[in-house]
DNA sequence: CATGAATGAGCTTTCATTCAT
DNA sequence: TATGAATGAAAGCTCATTCAT
């Protein structure tokens, strides 16, 4: 008789659970000491498992970091998209509110745990060429996503008709990126909020004084 | 007639020259294969010198990468400051022109050789904690510099009086950063110029359609 | 039935065994070729193990030599003290017999394997300052031990009342030391015994002809 | 016309002088940091000469240490033999005085500069097999020399007729050796004199209380 | 003759990975 | 399935020695 009636046995669930724990432990280690300075033994020791066990769950050191980064990217993408479909708004005011909401989501992820931006932006690109490409892919995806929001705005007329959608998307994402990096040095929530507002102001009002030639 | 008129002998000049070559070779290697995947032997082999020779010029592997990054930072800082003092302009139009000039300088450095942004932004932060801090320091310096430009503009009245100088500086630098990263995937000069213009448009015109609520 | 009755598992016993073998192999190598001329690879090769394995048992090269010397010192100290408490005898005759016994013990250790004095007296002091100090410490301990024997004899009246206990202890140990060194060139047991007797004669009869002014 | 009429030109004299200085500098370095921890560059730096120059005076590192040890041995041998021919005395009293003189000579050499015994006894034997043999040779020579003194005393009747000349010589030299080693830890002249007296007492009076069975 | 720049053999040490238990 | 002992490739670094200047 099986111990579980569901499609996933208890053993399988435990396996999956440990897999999860290994990823989390690896995240901790990589963020704390860096990918290259982290040994498989460090990850295993943090969980109190034998380091041979690690290889029953992941093929090698390179494999685990892929999963760790996968996780981070998924979390960020979720924050960028949940409840915020590109075509969910119809006016500039709504759009600005949506952008603010997205910013708050990002602050929740990046700001709550500085290890997230550290790993994603500072550690991952230096691991190897393939990982650097993955990070670039992520940036490109973010560009596409932001561009979709902008295209929607242009189509509906609340954004400039002559907007260089791709370029502007990169510019906006750059401001977000910069904010994420700033959190590494300035982790206070107030700073984060202030930065988010500055970004919104630049987006909607520019920097020029009204009426200045 | 002496072989050298200056205070530097021929031998010293040759020494300095080789030192330079080692830094350049290290730059090549680090950009190509990454810091961790590069061995001292790789750098030496690239120059056709013995790897022991390397240690006559640099104390260890960590030492050389510091010098390589020093070089890059110096180059970027030079591009940001030469002929472009923060208080050199007096009107919004001039300022915009100045910003465009700075952008072109950056394109010359980042765009001409994508290894520069790759090393500075992708490789360096992952080397170790100290180097990551150096990169953050660099970002902070850039923030200060940009903030100085903005403060000047606020003081002279051609930039918004209520500008969050620090936050806006970070936002602007983020757009620059994003452009630099974009060059890794889109190295065509046309793309670079287009991106630069998009950044300027966001800065000066924002993204909103005129008259949109 | 359990494979092991004691608190030490089979694996632990094997581990301890290999540890012992490494110490012994290191002893062989150091005695044969000297500390500095011996590589970790030599020690490992002698056992047919990978040189990485060495580092699972000892922190570094300096660590192993400490253990090797520890062993030697322990062996010599055991020989000097076993069955020969300083206060175990009461007459000059008994003391002389005790000294002869101790001498025979030392011959068993030093004489049986010339590598023991070679390593302890010739190799160890030249390893580094710390090891030289250890050897000096060992000499001082031996001085204390011999001095205890002498003090006992003075107290009981069978040794000269005006004996410079410390100085005499060093003198006696010097004769032992010299005998140990002599074994490196003259390993024949007969020579060793003859030397031991000469030392005893000097101790008890001096060198002067009876009645000589 | 030659600058010097003698058989040794000025240039040759200067050469010889530098050679001497190199030996002395090497002695300093070896005694201070040990043979293996001393680099040729250290020796050269101490003299302010280029380390390439070293090789114009000595074939290699092994060569110089031979000369340094040669020097030490010569100094010790001189102290043991000068004004103290084995056959210069005729009575026990004179012999004892002679032994005391020799002891004082040794104290002058060993005691005045602890680096001498350190290098000769602690550093040299560990350099390599050949040097260890040289040190053993030195001990054997010292044995022969001391044995010559003893033989003379036996022949003249002031030393025991049944003296084991060789063994006793080794025993006596052992006491001297021990005194030399003691100086490394107890460099005060008073200690040294006390030790010398203890050795003489053992030699002439033994350790037994008069009349003890 | 003096120099020190160049060299590479050779060392110690690390650690990802394998595999017998 | 979990383990950790064993492994050796690979790296950083030193320094005695050479030799062109």
Image: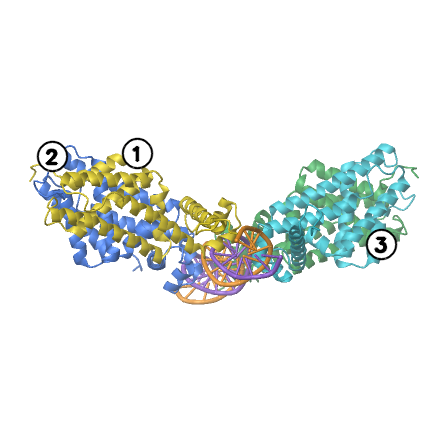
Chain colours: A yellow, B blue, C cyan, D green, E purple, F orange
- Report the residue that reaches farthest toward the front: A1
Residue at disc 2, secondary structure: loop
Given residues B121 and B55, the one toward you in this image is B121
Which mark is nearer the camera, 2 or 1?
1
In the rendered image, which quarter is residue C86 located in? top right
Question: Local crowd at mark 2 within 10 Å, few (<14), some, or many (≥20)?
Answer: some
Q: In this picture, is C157 found above or below B79?
A: above
Mark pair 3, 1: CA separation: 88 Å
For disc 2, the chain is B
For disc 1, the chain is A
Residue holding disc 1 = A189
Look at the image and tell me in which quarter the N terminus of chain B lies.
bottom left
Residue holding disc 3 = C194
Asked if residue B113 shows in the view, the reply is no
Asked if residue A164 shows in the view, the reply is yes
Q: Position of residue C94 (x, y in %)?
A: 89, 41
Given residues C4 and D189, the one toward you in this image is C4
């Amino acid at each position: 008789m099986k111990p579980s009636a569901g499609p996933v046995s208890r053993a399988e669930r435990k396996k999956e659970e440990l897999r999860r724990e290994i990823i989390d432990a690896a995240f901790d280690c990589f963020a704390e000491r860096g990918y290259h300075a982290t040994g498989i033994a460090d990850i295993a020791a943090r969980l109190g498992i034998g380091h041979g066990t690690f290889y029953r769950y992941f093929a090698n050191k390179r494999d685990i970091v892929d999963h760790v980064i996968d996780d981070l990217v998924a979390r960020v993408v979720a924050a960028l998209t949940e409840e915020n479909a590109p075509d969910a708004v119809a006016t500039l005011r709504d759009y600005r509110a949506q952008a603010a909401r997205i910013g708050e989501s990002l602050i929740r992820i990046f700001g709550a745990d500085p290890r997230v931006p550290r790993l994603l932006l500072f550690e991952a690109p230096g691991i190897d060429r393939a990982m650097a490409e993955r990070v670039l892919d992520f940036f490109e995806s973010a560009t596409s996503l932001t561009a979709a929001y902008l295209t929607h705005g242009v189509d509906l007329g609340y954004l400039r008709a002559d907007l260089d959608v791709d370029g502007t998307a990169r510019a906006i994402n750059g401001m977000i990126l910069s904010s994420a990096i700033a959190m590494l040095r300035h982790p206070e929530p107030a700073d984060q909020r202030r930065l988010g507002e500055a970004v919104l102001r630049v987006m909607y009002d520019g920097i020029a004084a009204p009426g200045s030639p």
